[in-house]
Image: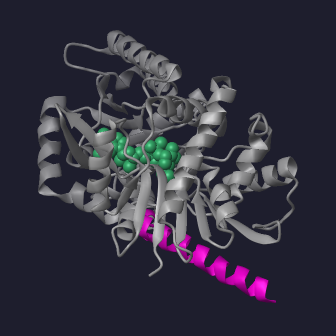
Amino acid sequence: MAKTIIVSNRLPIRIEKEEEELIYKTSEGGLATGLGSIYKENDNIWIGWPGISLEKEEEQEVEEELINRNMRPVFLSESEVQEFYLGFSNQTLWPAFHYFIHHMRFKEKEWIAYMQANQKFADAISKWLEPDDTIWVHDYQLMLVPELLRNKFPNVTIGFFQHIPFPSYEVFRMIPWRKKLLNGLLGADFIGFHTYDDMRHFLSSCHRLAGYSYNRNQILVKNRLVEVDSLPMGIDYDKYAESAGSQLAKAKEISYRDSLGPQDLILSMDRLDYSKGIPGRLRAFEKFLGEYPEYQGRVSMFLIVVPSRDKVPSYKELKEEVEFLVGHINGKYGTINYVPIHFYYRSFPLDDLSAFYRMCKIAMITPNRDGMNLVSKEYIASRENVDGVLILSEMAGASKELSDALLVNPNDEAQMVLSIKTALEMPLSEQKRRMSSMQKTVQKYTIFQWVDLFINNLKDLKKRQLAMATK
Ligand code: GDG
């Protein structure tokens, strides 16, 4: 029976070493939830890196354990993690694709490591691949994998989804290996992006940098039809709505509220990443407290920063900047019974997240760039009483669907400051009208619907390719 092979840099599992024992922790990320309905079925599998460097004997043990869980590991050495993952993926592609051109670096050695790691993933896929299988590759760490597979298996079905933005041609062309990256992706049959703009940028780069002509969303690559489309990713709405409505989340909300005091709360929750706009948000909050002193003592920010890539220097610097700003603002406006910013540098279990989503009247999500941003959708799904206000950056993919949020340009400090005031003063009837409309959207376009749409598009295209070939 034909199977589906999901491929991503990280497997939907975390392996941790406690003393000499290996502990397996399943990931609850959005992608793992959505694709859980696929990779756990029949002979389907998920191929990726288990997120830890191991001794040879341990690799054997992990492989056996993962096979029972429909997963196949690709093991990366310390130097591969350093050069392919932390290097080229996160210090060349990530900043380029998020328009942080001053953070980009171009190291030949890291590009070579990227090519070799992509080959390693392609080899692992080849090992398990049978002719009628469907392969679905995820994200910017694996852009060369589709072409590597296409060269070896000309007729195999390959889909690719890009979770981060695709930048304008003007930025993409700065990467020395741009044409190789484009040709890598064009090995796929179907390529999905979160937004129409990302898709347009990709098509423009294919045309201007690699000479391909396209018609609407179709590109002809050596007589093979490749299609691109925008497919905004959703969340498991019911999971977030049910968790937020549970007795546990309600009890936690009451107990946290008791300790925090009566202030209105503004939620800020992201991975530690310069693309997420955390310092700009803190500066806007500081300015708000200065410009509208009547709000001092009445509103606090609930700031969660989830540790991420903290070995990369620009992330370390960002952490220091956030810590400095929190200390500065709390020192400036805090009193014996008022803490302007409650800051947590760690991750929390879902029950806590749900309590936070419940207790914060405002969620302020203002990235400088974000492919989609799932936190904004989770906040909406968790608002059981259909109230609360979402302040959302126009630079997040989610803003294309959530037009009832207060949309802001994260570089426009005056607008950010005013949006906090507008959100705090918004009448309940307007909160409900906006929230109810956004809940309908997020409830309709879930992660499950996204997965089905992607797979159906891919299958449909394959049929049309076959019809073209037999004409
Ligand atoms: C990339 C793109 C795109 C966060 N803190 C905790 C926690 N989280 C969960 C959230 C959410 C996820 O992590 C973060 O997703 P985002 O979409 O906001 O951001 P990225 O990690 O940057 O994801 C992004 C996404 O891919 C999907 O395509 O939307 O644009 O950058 O689900 O809930 N989960 C738990 N504890 C935490 O403390 N359990």
Taking the spot 65% from the left edge, 28% from the top edge, the residue there is 109
Q: Which of 93 and 130 is in front in this view?
A: 130
Identify the image quadrant of the N terminus.
bottom left
Magenta span contains residue 15: no
On the question of residue 429 being in view, the answer is no
Q: Position of residue 315 (x, y in %)?
A: 48, 24
Q: Which of 118 and 320 is in front in this view?
A: 118
**Is residue 40 placed above or below 64 in the rendered structure?**
below
Res. 303 image quadrant: top left
Q: Which of 290 and 144 is in front in this view?
A: 144
Q: Nearer the viewer, residue 422 or 133?
A: 133
Res. 467 image quadrant: bottom right
- Residue 38 placement, left or right of 169: left
In this view, the residue farthest toward the front is 57
Q: Where is residue 229 in the image (x, y as percent from the top left)?
A: 66, 65
Taking the spot 11% from the left edge, 39% from the top edge, the residue there is 255
- Residue 319 placement, left or right of 103: left
Taking the spot 37% from the left edge, 30% from the top edge, the residue there is 307
Magenta span contains residue 450: yes
- Residue 248 placement, left or right of 209: left
Q: Position of residue 84 (x, y in %)?
A: 55, 35
- What range of the chain is rendered magenta? 442-471
